[in-house]
Amino acid sequence: MFGRARPATGFSADLKKLASLAPVPRAGAVLARGELADAGFAARVAELRARGERVVLALAGADNDPAELGCDRELVSAGDGWTLQSISS
Amino acid sequence: MNQEEQWLLPDGVEEVLPERARAIEQLRRRALDLYQSWGYELVYPPLIEFLESLLNGAGRDLERDTFKITDQLSGRLMGVRADMTPQVARIDAHSLRRNAPTRLCYCSTALRARPTQVGGTRLPYQLGVELFGHAGGDSDLEVILLMGETLALAGANDKVVLDLGHVGIFRALVDACDLDAAAQATLEDIYLRKARTELTRFLDGQALPEAAARALAALPFLDGDTGVFAQARGLLADFPDATRALADLERLVSVLAERGLDVHLDLGELRGYHYHTGCVFAAYLPGDSEPPAATITSVKCSAGRARPPASVPT
């Protein structure tokens, strides 16, 4: 054995186990019902994401079930803009 | 192999689904930010190494826990780390070589050849900190308080039992007895199981100094609150090293009590005895004795882990 002898103190834990000790509240998300090609829609989505929101795009022809996608609000077209409304479960 | 069997994961190997992954990742980020704010620097030791390098200075348990595979490039035997602590110690001793105390933290997956408990994981996501280059109560206290903050981040500080011991006490008694390696191993095993009748039988079968035999017989059952200190002081009076270890522990416990951290003392605690010489501290979940949610180990004057020269001819 060669090298330096250094005293050490430390701790170690299994993060998977630690993380299971307390429930983490499920964060909501926004289901965005629009087309990404629409600049106004895309800007609104980007703005929500920049605010820290989780925004899931509804895809054309897909089921887009809000519960499965973890969404509690949706971004929908309203008049000439976009509005955020809650999804009743 | 039918289709169902193709999707079967090996024992102790699990996949983490989104909800749980989010909880784990959130805690990882917050914990590493916390360590950063305490001056601990993040390192990534390698997942795999040549076996002799990985196990240099390690004990038998780590050797048994290590997955071994042959390196197709060099033909040499490699091991997947079963525990990152020795790797981090090597980073301190050989890669950084600082004189000042070095504070490192890490968070990565390790792989164990055997789970630590029946039905337990073989893929722990190991999170930890190490403070190198200081032997004394200050570093123990810093690390224990940081572990307390980590448990608080996990929302678990009121759910765990903090168990504190000092392997220096047992070590001092064993040194005074001049036991051979086989007898020591038997005694350690009895201690780990706290098997009272077996312990009496073992001690009766050895020609031990009376004071040492009396202390060794009592030590595994000295557990509970600070009341055990008075009892232990009397039993250990003839053993200066054990008395010093006990005094270290007492000082630590009194500071922790001032900070509102109650601990359960276990003076016969030998977990990690082969690697550690100082305080051992673990946070247990009630009803889930093994493995602990988090373990503190104080490796007083441990040997620096050696790294063989990079260009070992094969």
Image (cartoon, rainbow, N blue to C red):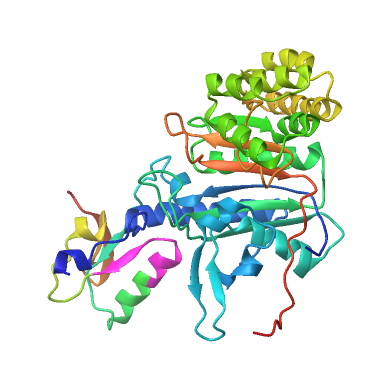
Determine whether, in the image, residue B115 is placed left or right of residue A86.
right
Q: Is residue B168 magenta?
A: no
Does residue A78 appear anywhere in the picture? Answer: no
For residue A41, what is the image quadrant? bottom left
Determine whether, in the image, residue B147 is placed left or right of residue B250.
left
Above or below, comparing residue B278 to residue A32 in the picture: above
Determine whether, in the image, residue B237 is placed left or right of residue B307.
right
| Residue B226: % across, % down | 68, 17
Q: Quadrant of the N terminus of chain B?
A: bottom left
Q: Residue at x 44, y 61 (%)?
A: A52
Tell me which segment is drawn in magenta. A46-57
Depth check: give the residue in front, A62 or B314: B314
Determine whether, in the image, residue B290 is placed left or right of residue B191.
left
Q: Residue at x 33, y 55 (%)?
A: B11
For residue A76, what is the image quadrant? bottom left
Q: Is residue A51 magenta?
A: yes
| Residue B313: % across, % down | 69, 85
Depth check: give the residue in front, B146 or B314: B314
Does residue B208 appear anywhere in the picture? Answer: yes
Q: How many marks?
A: 0
Q: Residue at x 58, y 21 (%)?
A: B201
| Residue B2: % across, % down | 14, 68
Depth check: give the residue in front, B213 or B50: B213
| Residue A17: % across, % down | 44, 46
Q: Residue at x 59, y 42 (%)?
A: B295
Q: Quadrant of the C terminus of chain B?
A: bottom right
Above or below, comparing residue B155 to residue B60 in the picture: above
